[in-house]
Image (cartoon, rainbow, N blue to C red):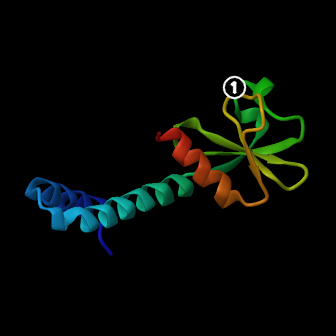
């Protein structure tokens, strides 16, 4: 298994070569790098009580616990079994029974 540093080095080498043949390889390496970053981000999550957040007014009424990730980002765990990501505390945000879908959405939102 390649480390992120090895993937980055190969990626930079390919980009510096400026060849058209490298497009597919560059795309595959970039996707692998993004997937590793997503997995590391998800693995940083820890379930905490809502009181661990500084501003409880942003939470949904049905929130029982939160999963806090690196950088202080969090997903709310709702009484109805759903997971919710809405950093502004208003609107629908991203809500699903699948934690993976919400985490992936949150990661993309943070990194856009």
On the image, which quarter does residue 34 sit in?
bottom left
How many other residues sit within 10 Å of disc 1, few (<14), some (14-19) or many (≥20)?
few
Residue under label 1, please give it: 54
Q: Quadrant of the N terminus?
A: bottom left
Point out residue 21 in the picture as x, y percentages from the top left corner. 17, 68
In front of the other: 78 or 18:
18
Point out residue 28 in the picture as x, y percentages from the top left corner. 33, 66
**Residue name at image x 50 percent, y 60 percent:** 39
Side (left or right) of 108 relative to 35: right
**Residue name at image x 70 percent, y 36 percent:** 86
**Residue name at image x 79 percent, y 32 percent:** 59
Side (left or right) of 109 relative to 93: left
> Number of numbered discs present?
1
Residue sitting at the far front: 20
In front of the other: 32 or 53:
32
Side (left or right) of 82 relative to 24: right
Query: Is 1 located above or below residue 9 in the figure?
Result: below
Residue sitting at the far left: 17
**Residue name at image x 13 percent, y 59 percent:** 13
Point out residue 8 in the picture as x, y percentages from the top left corner. 24, 57
Query: Is 64 located above or below residue 53 in the figure?
Result: below
Q: Mark 1 falls on what kind of element?
A: loop
Point out residue 67 in the picture as x, y percentages from the top left corner. 68, 47
Residue sitting at the far bottom: 1
């Amino acid at each position: 298994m390649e480390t992120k540093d090895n993937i980055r080095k190969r990626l930079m080498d390919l980009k510096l070569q400026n060849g058209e043949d490298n497009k597919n390889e560059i795309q595959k390496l970039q996707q692998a790098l993004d997937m590793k970053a997503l997995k590391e981000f998800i693995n940083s999550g820890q379930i905490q009580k809502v009181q661990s957040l500084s501003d409880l007014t942003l939470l949904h009424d049905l929130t029982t616990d939160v999963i806090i990730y690196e950088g202080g980002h969090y997903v709310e765990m709702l009484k109805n079994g759903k997971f919710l990501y809405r950093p502004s505390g208003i609107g629908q945000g991203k809500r699903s029974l699948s934690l993976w879908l919400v985490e992936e959405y949150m990661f993309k939102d943070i990194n856009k």
